[in-house]
Image (tube, helix red, strand yellow):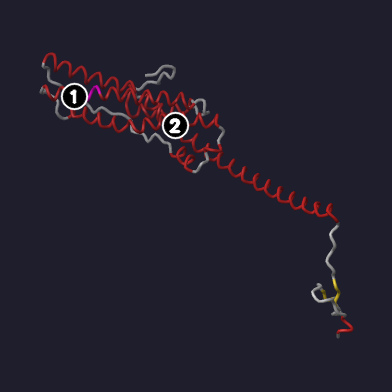
Amino acid sequence: MSDEAGSGTEGEPTELDREGAVHIHRPKPLKGLGGFLSEIAVIVVGILIALAGEQVVGNLEWAHRVHEAEGAMRAELGQNNRDAYYLLATHPCALAKLNEIQAALVASHDRGAPVAPITRYRRPLRPWLSDAWESARSLQITSHIPNSRLTLYSFAYFFPSVMRQTQPREREAMSDLNTLTLNAGRLEPAERDRLFHALVRTREVLEEMDGGAWLLLRATTPAGVVLSEAEKTAEMSKARQDFGACVAAPDLAQIP
């Protein structure tokens, strides 16, 4: 068997052919320094291509995430805009009711006139959304949005945040003022003073909320989020159903 198959030097690689013969493959000699450097260059180029491909895939993935995040933020700001327009449309209703309450309290103070029971002072309650913005920040997606656009989003989201924090004070002031729905009549001086204080706080919060709504509508425009005429008409229709004839289209050129 050894004569037919042949034998190789110990340590040298061998290979059996189809007939069982063993063939010896000697290591290929180096082709000099140039050949060695050429092989190294091929390896390096391959690594660079792989890294570049990975970077391209990563950039595409982040671009997709940014696109989805910006879409969610624009939708969220659009809802905030609709709520802001509704709020501003009901501003004349709020002013009329507060003026009515103030006139009754002044008459009670000056002439001792009894205060007639009033209908409840109402203001819209809205969520003032920022979930998409907070999610983009927590997932570090905002770090991949160009600074020019990021600044616009950051500024636009400032106002919903402030209004969401202010809204509880508005509800509290409303509750204090709406005790007149139950305890009208001839008011004791201490009760009348408490109501005057509630009235002042309610007016202050009204200015803050409606001023914030007006500023929100202006801040979202550079970010490309603008109410359509159809959206304005829809919000006006809903406001009239809820508050009646006192509703009026807001003048967006002038802060309320």
In-image side of 213 versus 171 (left or right): right
Question: Which percent across, then down, holds residue 101?
Answer: 21, 21
- Residue 89 covered by magenta stretch: no
55 or 236, nearer to the observer = 55
Alpha carbon distance from label 2 to label 1: 34 Å
Residue 157: numbered disc? 2
- What's the magenta bit mostly, secondary-structure-wise? helix
Q: Against 16, is 229 above or below?
A: above
Quadrant, the C terminus: top left
**Sequence-earlier tag: 2 or 1:** 2
Chain part drawn in magenta? 195-200
Quadrant, the N terminus: bottom right
Q: Amino acid at mark 2?
A: Tyr
For label 1, the crowd category at 10 Å Cα-Cα, with few meaning under 14, some 14 to 19 and many 20 or more, is many
Residue 169: numbered disc? none
**Judging from the image, what secondary structure is the residue with disc 2 in?**
helix
Residue shown at 46% from the left, 28% from the top: 155
Q: Residue furthest front?
A: 33
Residue shown at 12% from the left, 20% from the top: 114
In-image side of 154 versus 166 (left or right): right
The quadrant where residue 245 appears = top left
Reading the image, the residue beneath label 1 is 195
